[in-house]
Image (cartoon, rainbow, N blue to C red):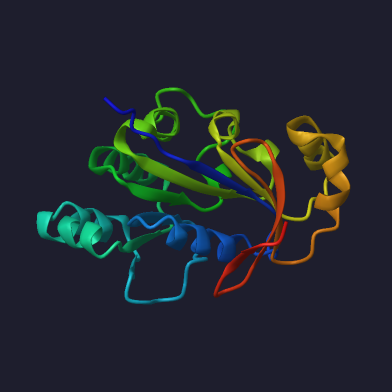
């Protein structure tokens, strides 16, 4: 029997460097329906695939409707949940693990998964066991030190925007080597240093329309 797998993407970078744009492109390219946790109202554009919920209760009622769930998968919809609190986020993770076969996007993941996250939290379990439900995960954060090591340790692909803080540079040094720090600290807006599953570095440039692998 073939093992079910998932992919975890982590995007690290300061506000204004293109994290949201990259996240939207990755979500689209992943070719799955998605649940998008949006605490700061970043995912604002509306298109035929995207449905925005301004309350968790509205999302919960929608996703538990069997007809809507079929539409979710068939249309590969993006369900954006605005400003869920901690308890609501926990339930989103439980729902995500239960229904499976989609992408879970968590913007500003440090708000929900700080280094102090415990093993009984649904997101911790999803990060470590999501492969059984075929749930891919995309997280964004401004600083690597602000998110749980359980996320970064399970991550398959990491994207760094321009790094500004010494601790962030030290993280890159430990992750892929000191020789890549200069590249990371001189990245332009909408450019990223991508580390793939083989720990190979690449430069990625994104726009609203496309992501281009430039090296």
Image coordinates for residue 124, horizontal then vertical, percent: 44, 30
Q: Position of residue 134 (x, y in %)?
A: 33, 39
* In front of the other: 120 or 46: 46
Residue 35 vertical placement versus 43 (above, below) = above
Residue name at image x 24 percent, y 38 percent? 98
Is residue 61 visible in the rendered image? The answer is yes
25 relative position to 11: left or right: left
Locate the C terminus by quadrant.
Answer: bottom right
Question: In the drawing, does residue 107 fall left or right of residue 94?
Answer: right
Residue visible at 56% across and 36% down in the picture: 155
Q: Is residue 40 visible?
A: no
Q: Is residue 112 left or right of residue 136?
A: right
Number of marks present in the image shown: 0
Residue 150 location, quadrant: top right
Residue beneath the point at 31% across and 28% down: 2
Relative to 77, does residue 106 appear above or below in the rendering?
above
Q: Nearer the viewer, residue 134 or 41?
A: 134
Q: Nearer the viewer, residue 92 or 9?
A: 9
Q: Position of residue 25 (x, y in %)?
A: 51, 63
Is 202 located above or below residue 82 in the figure?
Answer: above
**The N terminus appears in which quarter of the rendering?**
top left
The location of residue 30, given as percent across then percent down, is 43, 55
């Amino acid at each position: 029997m073939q093992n079910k797998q998932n992919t975890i993407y982590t995007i690290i970078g300061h506000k204004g460097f293109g994290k949201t744009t990259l996240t939207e492109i990755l979500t689209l390219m992943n070719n799955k329906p998605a649940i998008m946790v949006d605490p700061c109202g970043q995912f604002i554009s509306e298109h035929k695939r995207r449905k925005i919920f301004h309350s968790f209760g509205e999302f919960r009622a929608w996703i538990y409707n069997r007809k809507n769930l079929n539409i979710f998968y068939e249309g590969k919809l993006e369900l954006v949940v605005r400003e869920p609190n901690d308890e609501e986020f926990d339930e989103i993770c439980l729902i995500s693990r239960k229904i499976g076969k989609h992408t879970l996007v968590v913007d500003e993941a440090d708000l929900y998964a700080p280094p102090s996250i415990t093993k009984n939290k649904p997101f911790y379990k999803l990060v470590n066991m999501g492969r059984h439900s075929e749930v891919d995960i995309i997280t964004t954060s401004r600083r690597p030190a602000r998110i749980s090591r359980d996320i970064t340790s399970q991550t398959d692909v990491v994207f760094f925007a321009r790094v500004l803080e010494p601790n962030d540079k030290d993280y890159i040094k430990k992750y892929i080597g000191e020789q890549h720090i200069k590249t990371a600290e001189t990245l332009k807006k909408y450019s990223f240093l991508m580390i793939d599953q083989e720990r190979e570095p690449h430069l990625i440039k994104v726009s609203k329309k496309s992501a281009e692998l430039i090296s």
